[in-house]
Image (spheres, rainbow, N blue to C red):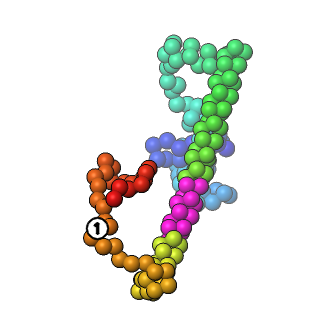
Amino acid sequence: MAATQRNGQARTTGARQASSGRRRADGRHTSGSRGQYYVQGNVVRKLDVTREIERQPQKKISNTTRKNREKAKNMNAGYVVFLCAALAFTGLILMNYIGLQSDITNSIQHISALESQLNQLKLENDEEYSRITSSVDLEEIKRIAIQELGMQYAEEGQVVTFASESSDYVKQMADIPD
C-alpha cells in the first residue's frame, strides 16, 4: 500500500480500510471510509520524496541556456587541448613563482644569519678594544720612552705648522724645512 501526504494529512491508496477507528496490524488507526489515518507515537514515517520531486513543475529553460549546455556537453578536441595547455602553462608559472618565493625566503634567512654574525663580530671587537685600552698604562709608556729610549718633549722651535688642503691625512713627500 503506498502512502502520500497532502495538506498535513496522511492518505493511503490501495485497498479500502475497514470501519473507522480500528487499529490495523501495523499500529496505525484508520478513520473513516476514505482511508485516512494517523500515527501514534514519536516515530515519523519516511515519505517517498522522489515522487514529490518528479511532480514539481519543471522550470522552462531559455534557448541560450539550453544551447550553452549543449555546447558544454560537446567539447571538441581542440578546445580540450587548449585547456590542457593553459593548465600546464599555469602550473609552470605557479611552480616558478613558488621557486622564487623559496629563493627569497632562503636569501632572507641567509642575510639574517650574516647580520647575526656581523653583530657578534662587532661585539667581540668592541670587547677586545676595551680590553686592550684598559690594559695600556700610559705612564709606563712615558717612562720607557723618556728613560730607556732617550726621547724628549718637543721645544717651541721644533714644532712646525702648515696649511693642508684636506683634513684627512698628511703625506710627507719631502723633508720639512727648518
Q: Residues within 10 Å of mark 1 (few under 14, many from 20)?
A: few
Asked if the magenta segment contains residue 113, the reply would be yes
Residue found at x 33% / y 54%: 167
Identify the image quadrant of the N terminus. Answer: top right
The boundaries of the magenta stretch are 110-123
> What residue is rendered at 70% in x and 19% in y?
81
Residue 52: percent from the left, percent from the top? 56, 36
Q: Position of residue 145 (x, y in %)?
A: 46, 81
Residue located at (49% from left, 16% from top): 62
Q: Nearer the viewer, residue 102 or 178?
A: 178
Q: Main secondary structure of the magenta part?
A: helix
Query: In the displayed structure, does residue 178 sit left or right of residue 10?
Result: left
Which residue sits at x=32%, y=67%? 158
Q: Please give the residue where the numbered disc 1 appears in the rendered image.
A: 157
Viewer-nearest residue: 131 or 63:
131
Amino acid type shown at disc 1? Gly
For mark 1, give the secondary structure. helix
Image quadrant occupied by the C terminus: bottom left
Q: Is residue 146 above or below residue 48?
A: below
Visible residue check, residue 47: no
Q: Is residue 90 left or right of residue 121?
A: right
Of residues 41 and 111, the one nearer the viewer is 111
Measured as percent of width and height from the top left, residue 107 is found at 58, 50
